[in-house]
Amino acid sequence: MQKKRVIDIILLVVILALLYFGIFILKGEEYYLVSLLILVIGILGFLFSFEKGQPGVALLTVTASLCALAAASRIAFFFLPQVKPIAAVVIIAGVAFGPEVGFVTGAVSAFVSNFYFGQGSWTPFQMFALGMIGFFAGLLLRGSRNRLLVALYGFFSVPVFYGGIVEINTIFFTVREPTAVQAAGVYLAGLPFNLLFGLSTALFLFFLYRPVLRHLERMGKKYELETLPRIDKEEGT
C-alpha cells in the first residue's frame, strides 16, 4: 500500500509539472498533447494499482463503463450549466474502487465530454480537477457506507478542487501578469457557480449513491471484484 501511494505522489507531481509546462512554455496552445499525457499518466497509476490476484481486465471493463457514464451524464445535462452528475459519478468510482480508478474516471470523462462542450486550454485543468476529486474520494472515503458523508465531500470538493484548479486556467490566460489579489478575485467571481455545482453534486450523491453502488456491487460480483462497500448493510444515513 505504501509503495502505491509513493507511485501516486510521483505521478501527481509529474502531472503538476505538465500543467506548469503547458502554462508557461506552451502558453496553453498544445492542450491536446498535455491532455493526452495526463491520460497516459493516469492510466499508468491505474495499472500500478492492481492488487495481487485482482482481475485487471475486469476492473478495466468496469472503469471504462464508469468513464462512459460520467461523460454521458455531463452531456445529458448540457442545458443546466452547473447542475451535472459527472462529479458524483467520479466520486462514486473512487469510493467503490479506489483513488486510481477515481482519478482515471475523472480525467477521461472530462476529456471525452469536452469533445461536445469544446476543447481548449482549460481541458487539462478540468481533467486534473475531476481526477483529483475522484482520487481523494477513494483515498478518504474508500468503502464508506455513509451517503451523507459522501455527499458532504461532494459539496466541498467541487469548490476546492474543481474551482481551485480550473480557475488557474482563467487566471493565467485571461489576466495579464496576475497578482494574488487578481487571482483571489477570479476565484471569488466563480465561487457562486462552483458552489452550485457542489450543491448539485451533493444532491446527486445523496439520492443516487445507494442505487448506483448496488448496481456496481452486482457488477463486482459478476467480475469477482471485492472492492465495494456493503450497501445492503448500510447503517444510519
Image (spheres, rainbow, N blue to C red):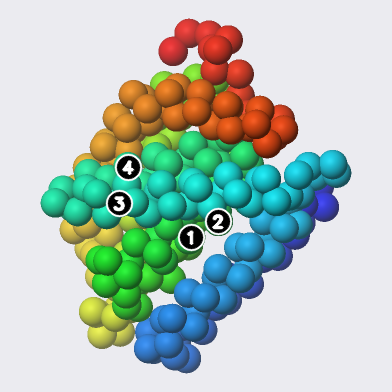
Helix, strand or loop at mark 3? helix
Q: Which residue is mark 1?
A: 107
- Horizontal and vertical percent position of residue 233: 58, 10
Q: What amino acid type is highlighted by mark number 1?
A: Ala
Q: Nearer the viewer, mark 1 or mark 3?
A: 3
- Horizontal and vertical percent position of residue 172: 33, 78
Q: Which residue is mark 2?
A: 104
Q: What amino acid type is highlighted by mark number 4?
A: Pro
Residues at badges 4 and 2 in contact (C-beta under 8 Å)? no
Q: Which residue is mark 3?
A: 74
Q: Viewer-proximal residue, 110 or 159?
A: 110
Residues at badges 3 and 4 in contact (C-beta under 8 Å)? yes
Which of the image's four quarters has the C terminus? top left
Which of the image's four quarters has the N terminus? top right
Helix, strand or loop at mark 4? loop
What is the spatial separation of the Cα atoms under label 3 and label 4, in whole angstroms? 6 Å
- Horizontal and vertical percent position of residue 10: 70, 65
What is the spatial separation of the Cα atoms under label 3 and label 2, in whole angstroms? 16 Å
Helix, strand or loop at mark 1? helix
Residue furthest right as drawn: 52
Helix, strand or loop at mark 2? helix
Q: Residues within 10 Å of mark 3 (few under 14, many from 20)?
A: many
Which of the marked residues, 3 or 2, is nearer the chain's N terminus?
3
Residue at (57% x, 26% y) in the render: 218
Q: Which mark is residue 85?
A: 4
Residue at (25% x, 66% y) in the render: 117
Residues at badges 1 and 2 in contact (C-beta under 8 Å)? yes
Q: Is residue 34 visible?
A: yes
